[in-house]
C-alpha cells in the first residue's frame, strides 16, 4: 500500500514538473532545463546525470510544440535559426560527451554557476 502511494506521489510530482517546465519553455522560448533539472534532483531524487539527460529528452517535444506555434505566428528568423542549429548540434554533441565524464558534484556546481550567471545577465546585463 505504501509503495503504491509513493508511486502515485512521484507520478503527480512528475506531471507538475512537466507542466511548469512546459510553461517556462513555451513562455520564455527556452529555459525548461533550468526548471526540470533541479526539480528532478530535489523532488524525484534523480542523480545529476540522469536529471540532465532526462531534461533534454523532456524538452525536445516541448520545443517542437513551441516552435510550431512560433512558426505559425511567423516569429522565426530562418537565416539565424539554421546557422544556430548547425552550431547547436556540434555543441550538443560535445556537451553530452563532456557530461558523461564530469563528476556529479562538479556538474551540479557548473550548472549552478551557469544559472546564476544567466540570471545576473538577464537582470543587469544588456
Image (cartoon, grey):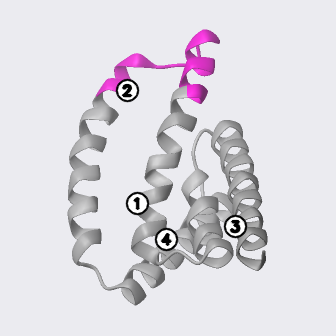
In the image as oriented, which residue stretches furthest toward the front? Answer: 1
Residue 10 at x, y percent in the picture? 70, 66
Q: Nearer the viewer, residue 82 or 52?
A: 52
Residue located 56% across and 19% down the image: 68
In the rendered view of the protein, which quadrant contains the N terminus? bottom right
In terms of secondary structure, where does tag 3 sit?
Answer: helix
Residue 115 location, quadrant: bottom right
Asked whether the residues under the numbered discs 3 and 1 touch, taking CB atoms below 8 Å apart as contact, a structural biologist would say no
> Would you name the residue on which mark 1 appears?
53
Q: How far apart in space, not on screen, are marks 4 and 3 (Cα)? A: 32 Å
Q: Earlier in the sequence, mark 1 or mark 2?
A: 1
Count of number-bearing discs: 4
> Would you name the residue on which mark 3 appears?
7
> Would you name the residue on which mark 4 appears?
114
Q: Which residues are magenta?
A: 65-82
Which numbered disc, 3 or 1, marks the residue closer to the eye? 3
> Would you name the residue on which mark 2 appears?
80
Residue 47 at x, y percent in the picture? 47, 78
Q: Is residue 67 magenta?
A: yes
Which numbered disc, 4 or 3, marks the residue closer to the eye? 3
Amino acid at each position: 500500500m505504501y509503495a503504491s502511494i509513493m508511486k502515485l506521489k512521484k507520478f503527480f510530482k512528475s506531471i507538475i514538473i512537466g507542466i511548469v517546465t512546459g510553461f517556462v519553455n513555451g513562455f520564455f522560448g527556452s529555459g525548461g532545463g533550468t526548471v526540470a533539472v533541479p526539480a528532478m534532483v530535489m523532488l524525484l531524487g534523480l542523480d545529476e546525470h540522469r536529471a540532465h539527460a532526462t531534461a533534454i529528452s523532456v524538452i525536445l517535444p516541448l520545443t517542437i510544440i513551441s516552435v510550431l506555434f512560433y512558426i505559425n505566428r511567423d516569429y522565426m528568423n530562418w537565416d539565424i535559426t539554421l546557422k544556430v542549429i548547425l552550431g547547436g548540434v556540434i555543441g550538443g554533441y560535445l556537451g553530452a560527451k563532456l557530461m558523461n565524464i564530469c563528476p556529479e558534484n562538479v556538474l551540479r556546481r557548473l550548472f549552478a554557476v551557469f544559472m546564476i550567471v544567466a540570471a545576473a545577465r538577464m537582470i543587469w546585463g544588456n
